[in-house]
Amino acid sequence: MDKTAETDVTSLVSGFDQLAERFVSGLSERFAALSGASVELENLKASLAAEGTSLLALMFEIVLVVALVAGGFILLARRFKKAGAKSSAWRRFFAGLAAAVVALVIGFIAARLLAGSGLPLQTLHLWTIATVLGLIILATVRSLLMASRRTEFAECSAHLTALVRDLSFAIGFALIGVTLLGTSRIWSVGPALEDLLRTGSAIPIYLLFAWAVWRHRRTMAVAVAGPRPRSRWRTHLAKKWPAIVIAFLIVTFVSTQAALTLGASLRGSAVLLTALMFLAAPHLDAMIGNWAQRGLESPDISILAAAGRQTARFTIVAIMIATLGTLWATPLAAGFGIDLRELAKGASGVALITLVAAFLWNVVGTGTARALRAELHVVGGDEEVPGAPRSRLGTLVPLLSAVGKSSILALALLSILVSIGINVWPLIAGLSVFGLAIGFGSQTLVKDLVSGLFFLIDDAFRFGEYIETSGAKGTVEKISVRSVSLRHQRGALATIPYGEIGKIQNFSRDWMIEKLTFRVAFNTDVEKVRKIFKKIGQDISANPELAGDLLEPFKSQGIAEVEDGTLVIRAKFKAKAGRQSMIRRAALTAVHQAFQENGIQAVPKPLTGSAAPG
């Protein structure tokens, strides 16, 4: 065992030594090859002369074609934008697509007129396509970032505009570098000149990106954070995002140079596309999240449409993962002899099942959110009542949502296992036997579940209601399938299984009658007290803050009893359940003030106790 471990360590060290030796030798070869760059440049000029052009003429033709394509695209895009300023997003998208097609046609015609045929024509075609793709990428990046103006950036759009400008400059420089590499391959330049061109363009590109990110790090952090409310992980990611981007740029540059030194250069288009996707992912997610949130809050958008907007975030992530897999995992799978068709078929099946499950999950979540929002808002208004009891539907919806989401998740997992060829029937049978064992062995658990089911069917309590059971009392704060949690007015939280609840007294249903007792001197004018209480009742009924919760006015009930030469006078009022405390407080304050103004003497209740023996 020790010899095997020693052998593995020796092999690992030997592998690292060989890798280091290859890296050092490759680096030496790269530096040594730079001396032949001048010879390769002369060969390039000879190739250009053989095609009937020169390096200066080709550069002029490239600049002219790029100017024509870019100018045509920008002019057409602006014209389409003005024409469809009030049109839908899809119409603007297709208008931009039409502008791109027209710009391509302009570029191809200009290339034919300038170059004729051969390698010069291929070069101009490459720059035409690269220009159109670059303009589309720049427009997409601008849309992703500038979408924040409508939410968090209304007051600092100038900072966002500067961020877009600097990032666009860096992206444009990167696109020029990738296109130059493509041009060098068309003309079959030597390895030294290609290496010089690759490294010479990469260094300023990465520096420009890092400079733009660091200069606008606060602006980028706010853009990544997205609209409020924000989750904790989103806020943390936004704060760290500029540093993450700069670290990613450093790792990407080091990786590409190391691969080039080891003789396995990475494709520039794949690296650029990966970097753009990495940079755009959180901004795109923030924009789609804002769009989905507006759909969730808008009553004019159906639940299915709002759920579709929520699912769009997951779809974008799946598309990005698939694109990255195509760029990087496909060559690796081909190298290991993996059947790409079977792999793609299995991945497509899993992705489809996951997408359908995500849509159904969002349908349940959207329906739940809208139902709870309707319960938490005042009827006819937009202000929330945080402590208001919910209706029966508002109480059952979270439980139904939890059951629905759990069922969707379980079915999705089983479907994924079936799609990848795993027999799930033994698993289902095992879970069934396990469930029966729990049912027979845990009678208390079954009692709690059944009791809770009947409590919910009987509508015994709801979220936010104040109830009293045989063991505790408080406001219903949480309802699960097995227990209910009550928050006492002093803050303690009691969790009671349904099987141990017993009798329930609900103090938050329909109405409550509040009775108040006052002890006054025996010679007090009872009729005067009655008139005072009537006047207090009229004042409370006229108070707009209290009148809506008052069902019957505050009034006197006369003398209830006589105790030790003291008159006990009672009063009462009827109010909505859970809303009587404010009225009670106002009535007691008014009675105290009225007794002082009218000279009515309140008598304390006598203390009771046993007398000491004489």
Image: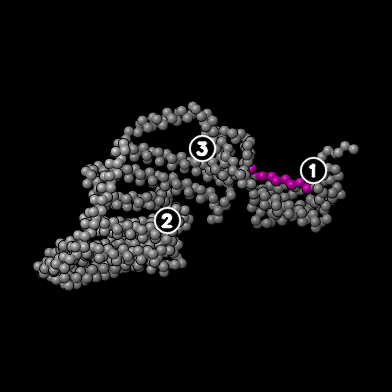
Label 1, residues with CA under 10 Å away: few <14, some 14-19, many ≥20: few
Q: Which residue is mark 1?
A: 560
Q: Nearer the viewer, mark 1 or mark 3?
A: 3
Q: Is residue 458 above or below residue 600?
A: above
Measuring from the top left, give residue 99's x and y in whole percent: 27, 64
> Answer yes or no: do the residues labelled 1 and 3 have beta carbons within 8 Å?
no
Decide if residue 367 is in sight here: yes
Instruction: Tell me the quarter of the image containing the C terminus.
Output: top right
Q: Which residue is mark 2?
A: 237
User: Which residues, given as a range, are shown in magenta?
Assistant: 506-518
Q: CA distance from mark 2 to mark 3?
A: 35 Å
The front one of 489 and 543 is 489
Q: Nearer the viewer, mark 2 or mark 1?
A: 2
Q: CA distance from mark 1 to mark 3?
A: 47 Å
> Answer yes or no: do the residues labelled 2 and 1 have beta carbons within 8 Å?
no
Which residue is painted at 35% across and 44% down in the image? 354
Decide if residue 287 is in sight here: no
Amino acid on which the number 2 mark rests in the picture: Leu
Q: CA distance from mark 2 to mark 1?
A: 68 Å
Measuring from the top left, give residue 193's x and y in whole percent: 19, 64
Which residue is painted at 16% across and 65% down in the image? 36
Give the mark count: 3
Q: Which residue is mark 3?
A: 481
